Every structure is written in C-alpha cells, then in structure tokens.
Image (cartoon, rainbow, N blue to C red):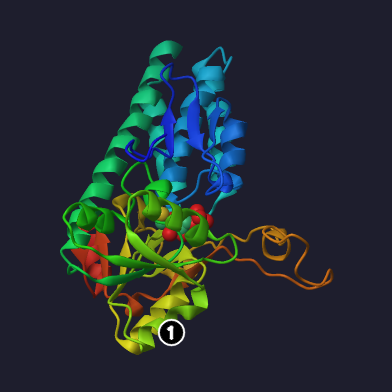
Amino acid sequence: MTAQEPLLPLRLDATGQSLIILDQTRLPGEEHYLALTRPDEIREAIAALRVRGAPAIGLAAAYGYYLAACVSTAISFASLRAELAAVAASLAACRPTAVNLAWALRRMERRLQSSADLPLVDIRRHLLAEAEAIRLEDEAMGLAIGTFGLDLLQPGMNILTHCNAGILATSRYGTALSPIYLGQARGYHFHVYVDETRPLLQGARLTAWELGRAGVDHTLVTDSACALLMRQGRVDACLVGCDRIAANGDVANKIGTATLAIVARHFGVPFYVLGPASTVDLNCPDGGHIPIEERNKAELTDLRYRQRMAPPDTQVYNPAFDITDHELITAIVTDRGVIRPPYSGQLRRVFA
Ligand code: MRU
C-alpha cells in the first residue's frame, strides 16, 4: 500500500468470504494484512487487538457474524440461530467496555430474525447487507464528527490526543482524529501531541504512524507529560475518542483519559470527547455501570520489553479503560452535532 492509497483497517475481500484486517499488533514495523474466515479467528483478532478501537471492533464482529453464517452447516433456521447466538455471545464477551461490539451484534441478530423465512443463501445476503450498512454508516458518522469537531478548532492549534481514535480504530475516518484530517485537507496546520498511551502504546505505535502517513505535524509525549505541556501553554484543546457514553455523559475511554481530563480542567484547557451514535448507551445510567475490561498482566510486565521489566512476584492490575466524569467534559462531539452540558437531557433528546 502506498501513502496515496486510503488506509482501510478492515474490509471484506472481493469474494465476500474473508475479512481482511491490518494486523495492528505489528504496526508500525510491518504493514501486514490477515485474511480471516472463521468467527474464532475474528474473535482472536479482536481479543489480541489486531483490530481495535470501538467502531472497528463492532464492524469486525458484524462481519464475523456474517462469516459464521457462511461457514455454518446448520440445516434449519432454529439451529442456525442457536449457532449464531453462541458466536455473538463469544464475540461480545471478548471486549466488554466498548458498547459498539454488542450494538453491532444486536443489529445482526435483528437482521437474522427478520430473515427467518428465507432460504439460507438469502439469509447470508441479508447479513452481508447489514454488515455493509454498519460500515457505510460508520464512515458517514466519522465524516460528520470531523465536520462538527472542526468547527470547535482554529488553524494552527496544538491538540493533545490519547490512544488511537483515528482511521485505524474505525472503518475509515476516525473519530477524535477526523477533524484533524479534515483540517489538514483545508490547510489548518494543526500540531498534535500524541500520548504514548501505556501500556500497549496505541499512541506511539498507531496514532504516530497514521498521522505521519497523512503528513500531520505531531510530537510523541509520555502520558504523564500532559500537566507540564498544559502548564507551559502548549495545548489548546484535548481531543479523545470513547468506548461508551453513558446516559449522564460519563465516558469510558482508554486508561489515562480521566487523568488527562482532570489535568485539562485544572489548566482551563477544553476537553472534547468525540464519538458516534453507536457509542452512546442510554441504557447505562452512568460511568459506574460501565464494565471495565481488565487485560492480561503480561501486557504490563513483559509485552514490550526485551526482558521482563517488573519483579516476578509483583501484583499487577491492568484495567484497559477508565471513566471520565461528565463534569470534566467541555463537549461531546457526535455525528448528530455537538452536545454540551447538561448531558443527560441533551443525550436523551438527540439519541432516544
Ligand atoms: O484498547 P483499544 O486500543 O481498543 O482502545 C481504543 C480506545 O480507547 C479508543 O479511544 C476508542 O475505542 C475510540 S476509537 C474511535
């Protein structure tokens, strides 16, 4: 793939029989694509963060559900439905925080149900159509978020971002990085501070890679540099993505996001959360009800070190996400517009 070609982190191949994903665990060193055909392969790819980011894992799961119907040998609708229900449960369980995963699978299950009277070949066609609809909607949502987000920014701004909420995390345009790309195309000349994002370094490995590929000026910093940068007046706005937006406006995102929001509030820097409708969960009253994914301890002690870094008997706690209190968020930028406090009423009005 050349720098001119659009970056597509996941897509179905021309035969419609396998999902091609860019293996994000191998970036930035290698741009390696995998062809996945079975739901267990897609589950592994989601769990191992080969494909990651809330919208992208929702889409991968939708394709996984469709591919499960393609490889199924079920002889009745009831047995197909039972088989796909097991696939959906297993996909949904592998990353519990991002609501997009369960949201996409619910859509696929509804589509299956509405195709109950059709022959298997048509059921597969309908499931493919639903997965493709999710992809196209996600593209449109990313673009809309970019347009609304750009209205909040001025040319030449210094923007701080955390984790990767860019192209790699979605079907096409990203969420938090979408306004940056739109601004880049319009000559806004943003400069982006990229949090390395411990412990899996989605910022250092992925955001720095995709911003570099797009020619966006950026500087890599440690997560804990945020207070110094803001004290020095180097940050005009923080832009982050999200994995779930609760009904009261509390937001789950990559661990470290809440710290950033607290520091931004201290220094009077606007803190914007950007996310699509598929990330809003009105059934979840507040951040206290969002399940926090806890990941393998070795990600913290071993994964990116030449030799184990922590003493062998050290206790480890490795939550992948945290909750940012709605009171710390300046605005939530969605594909349906910019939502400002008080969030409860606004979110319900826009997304009910
Ligand atoms: O664990 P990850 O890499 O999937 O975490 C991703 C994030 O926290 C993103 O900010 C979030 O999913 C939004 S992606 C548009």
Counting the numbered discs, the total is: 1
The foreground one among 247 and 16 is 16
Q: Percent x, y for residue 271? A: 31, 74
Instruction: Give residue 103's quadrant in the image.
Output: top left
Which corner quadrant holds the C terminus?
A: bottom left
User: How far across and down, in percent of the image, does residue 143 sit?
Assistant: 23, 48
According to the picture, the residue beneath numbered tag 1 turns out to be 227
- Residue in the image at 40% along x and 51% along y: 210
Can you say whether 75 is above or below 309 in the image? above
Left/right placement of residue 168 relative to residue 271 reads right
Q: In this orientation, does residue 212 appear?
A: yes
Q: Quadrant of residue 350?
A: bottom left
State the image coordinates of residue 111 (x, y, percent, origin top left): 37, 29
The N terminus lies in quadrant: top left
What kind of residue is marked 1? Ala
Q: Residue at x 33, y 25 (%)?
A: 129
In percent of width and height, residue 118 lies at 38, 14
Q: Residue at x 21, y 69 (%)?
A: 156
Residue positioned 52% across, 68% down in the render = 255
Secondary structure at numbered mark 1:
helix
Q: Is mark 1 within 8 Å of ligand 1?
A: no
**Residue 328 placement, left or right of 105:** left
Q: Is residue 119 visible?
A: no
- In the rendered image of this protein, does residue 228 appear above or below residue 5? below
Q: Front-most of 105 and 25?
A: 25
Judge left or right: residue 166 versus residue 294. Answer: left
Q: Quadrant of residue 309?
A: bottom right
Of residue 327 and residue 255, the one placed in the foreground of this image is 255
Query: For the residue carrying disc 1, how many other residues have a C-alpha within 10 Å: few (<14), some (14-19), or many (20+)?
Result: some
